[in-house]
Image: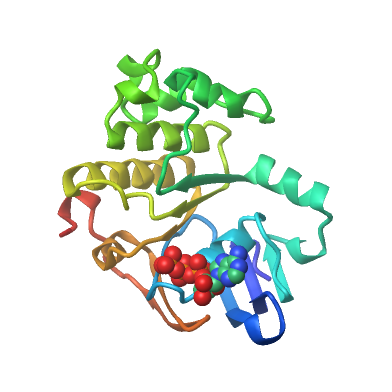
Amino acid sequence: MQSSTAFRTSGLTKVYGSGHSAVHALRGVDLEIPSGDIVVLLGPSGSGKSTLLNIIGGLDRGTKGEVYFRDHCLSDMSDAQLTRYRRDHVGFVFQFYNLMPSLTARENVELVTEIAADPMDPDEALALVGLRERVDHFPAQLSGGEQQRVAIARAIAKRPEVLFCDEPTGALDSETGRAVLQVLRDVNAEMGSTILMVTHNANTAAMADRVIYFADGGIRKVVENREKLSPSEIHW
Ligand SMILES: Nc1ncnc2c1ncn2[C@@H]1O[C@H](COP(=O)(O)OP(=O)(O)OP(=O)(O)O)[C@@H](O)[C@H]1O
């Protein structure tokens, strides 16, 4: 495998349940993701996008097949090793921001920086997402887009090599959504983080280096964008 490959899967299969109730969520996925790319995963509801993200993010395990992060085989890791992988290398951003309501923006980010190996200062991470003036505010005092930016600050504060985003703009209006995508794009440009984003907004594909089209538990096609749009140019 090339050293510039962030992820590689071969024959990755995921079956939930068994017998008559078995759901074949991934049917032998072969995939390679270069380091530093912005990758957008598109596909119908139920096609397996989140399942794939959760497995390469170390939140779940495949049923069969292999998953590599650089030269580390995630499929062979113990639960403790997977936890360490998530803690040391990975940031997550979800549709619903999962912030602690009783903590300020800064304290929400500190939850992560306190356990990370080489974290940013929480205020620096919040400044990077444009929230320098809001560090002492509680989630309820922030708009949806601002809360999502706190969640991004929390994810990037540990300087992750990879950022996994599952519908990061799903709960946002177009203007706020574009602003959040711009933050992700800036993180990719400034920190070199590989970004994997699952979305239902097909127009988001225009900002990606690579677009993976998913259907029925497998990859239908992969498209490399020679020219990328900036988030502000994306139609919603
Ligand atoms: N924990 C689970 N137990 C059983 N089946 C599951 C589980 N999680 C997902 N599935 C099923 O696996 C299939 C793939 O689901 P997944 O969430 O990966 O799809 P998706 O493409 O992300 O969908 P969406 O766009 O709606 O989020 C679906 O049929 C789903 O119902």
The image shows residue 142, relative to residue 26, as above or below, that is above
Q: How is the image coloured?
A: rainbow
* 134 lies left or right of 37: left
* Residue in the picture at 49% in, 19% down: 103
Q: Tell me residue 60's x, y (percent).
A: 67, 60
Nearer to the camera, 71 or 68: 68
Asked if residue 144 lies left or right of residue 59, the reply is left
Q: Is residue 23 above or below residue 166?
A: below
Q: Nearer the viewer, residue 185 or 198?
A: 198
* Res. 29 visible in picture: no
- Which quarter of the rendering shows the N terminus? bottom right
Q: Nearer the viewer, residue 86 or 79?
A: 79
Work out which quarter of the rendered image holds the C terminus and state it. bottom left
The image shows residue 160 at horizontal and vertical percentages of 57, 42
Count the numbered circles shown.
0
- In the image, 98: left or right of 82? left
Q: Could you say where residue 47 lies in the image, as x and y percent from the top left?
A: 46, 76
Q: Position of residue 171 (x, y in %)?
A: 30, 48
Q: As rendered, which of 223 and 146 lies closer to the eye?
A: 146
Work out whether 205 lies above or below 12.
above
Q: Residue furthest top?
A: 136
Q: What residue lies at 64% left-to-right and 45% top-to-bottom?
A: 89
The image quadrant of residue 229 is bottom left
Q: Is residue 228 visible?
A: yes
Q: Which residue is at 41% across, 44% downward?
A: 96
